[in-house]
Image (cartoon, rainbow, N blue to C red):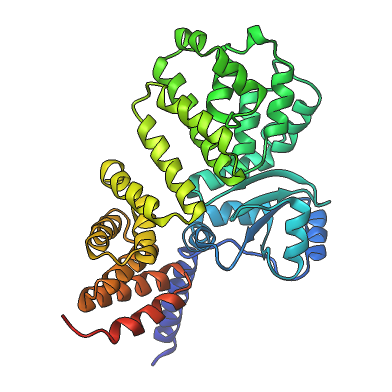
Amino acid sequence: MNMKLKHFFLLVLFSGSVLLSAQNREIQFEKGKWSSVLEKARKENKVIYLDCYTTWCGPCKWMAKKVFTNDTVADFYNKNFVNVKMDMEKGEGVELAKKYGIRAYPTMLYLDASGEIVHRSCGSTSTGKFINTGKDALNPDTQLRTFTKKFNNGINPETNVAAYFGMLDDACQEMQTELSNYFASQKDSQLASRANWEIIYRFVNDYSSREFQLFEKNKRSFEELYTVDSVRSKLNSVYASGLKQAVRKKDSDTYDALKAKVNSSGAADAEKIVMNAELELYQSKGDWDKYIQTANAYADKYLEDKASELNGIAWMFYEHTDDIALLQKAEGWAKRAVELQDIYPTNDTYASVLYKLGKKEEAKKAAERAISLAKESGSNYDETKELLKKIEKLKAR
């Protein structure tokens, strides 16, 4: 091969590798101790992006695979941040999780070089929103820290309270104290203002709170100012969460009172709310006969397009009944859940119900599908492997 031709091939090879590299960029995460991350942030005068994850968190793995490897995301974060990812259940992550109050995964923290939080968010998100969150973290006017300082310095027109509560909600932060403090600054006559109605509608979920009690007492005024449907929707939303809270606290008096309010509310979905609460009540008591009876009617009437709930009820039937007719109902719900959401958990439930019905080939196919999807998503599928072994031992029908 002559020298020119050799150089030509080397140039093509080099250009191809550069192009391939340029098309497969990803966020570059720092290695090493947390102290070295802080030091680098100080030297480069950059904000730190800390990806808080766990090994069992599916959305965390999705972010790592689909968002962190996006070219636009990689370019923006590599340019503007010192990036680090940390398992919050191992090593230094354990103490950082305590320090920063991490309760949901993934959590995205943005910190200054001293380790103080300037902004935060949580949950998996699109590439566009992830970049916008980063931009908010870089801009003092849009940082959560700035909004928090304004709120703590007193309620005034510049505080933009609804936006602040929205940021807390986006960051998976408790806000009951902040809500109580805000509404303590509001007179009864101010409660029905459009700004306050927006806050009540979006963020007030505590049945026992002063603001909800005032809203409930003055619901007719709210219906006149806004829509009847929106007011009833909010009432029933809080009643529903209140019912479940009463179940968890084993507070039968509050449960019965709320159940009566929902039933007399006139809302179209009153029956659905009560039945859903009854399912949680019977499950908490281990009253599987009543659970199955209620779930049977509830699933058929209300869950045609609700994959997660169909999957959950089908699983409960798998675990708590041997009645063939009921298991066949569970088979239908599990199959529908797979049609709506073809993911590991739905296929695993479908395989389990089919196994209990003795349908070997169909169960095997569903279990193998579940395992395949688990591998793709990085989910643990040890229990499905054990299920597959049991399926293999079934006699073919």
Quadrant assignment for the N terminus: bottom left
What residue do we see at 26% from left, 59% from top? 326
Which residue sits furthest left? 397
**Is residue 235 at least partly visible in the picture?**
yes
What residue do we see at 50% from left, 49% from top? 125
- Residue 132 at x, y = what percent? 56, 41
Left or right for 3, reference 49: left
Q: Is residue 200 above or below residue 135?
A: above
Using the image as rendered, state which of residue 20 and residue 58 is in the foreground.
Answer: 58
**Is residue 308 at least partly visible in the picture?**
no
Using the image as rendered, state which of residue 61 and residue 392 is in the foreground.
Answer: 392
What residue do we see at 24% from left, 57% from top? 329
Q: In this view, does 147 lie above or below 92?
A: above
Using the image as rendered, state which of residue 351 and residue 97 is in the foreground.
Answer: 351
- Residue 42 at x, y = what percent? 82, 54
Q: In this view, does 28 lie above or below 239?
A: below
Using the image as rendered, state which of residue 144 and residue 95 is in the foreground.
Answer: 95
User: Total number of numbered labels?
Assistant: 0
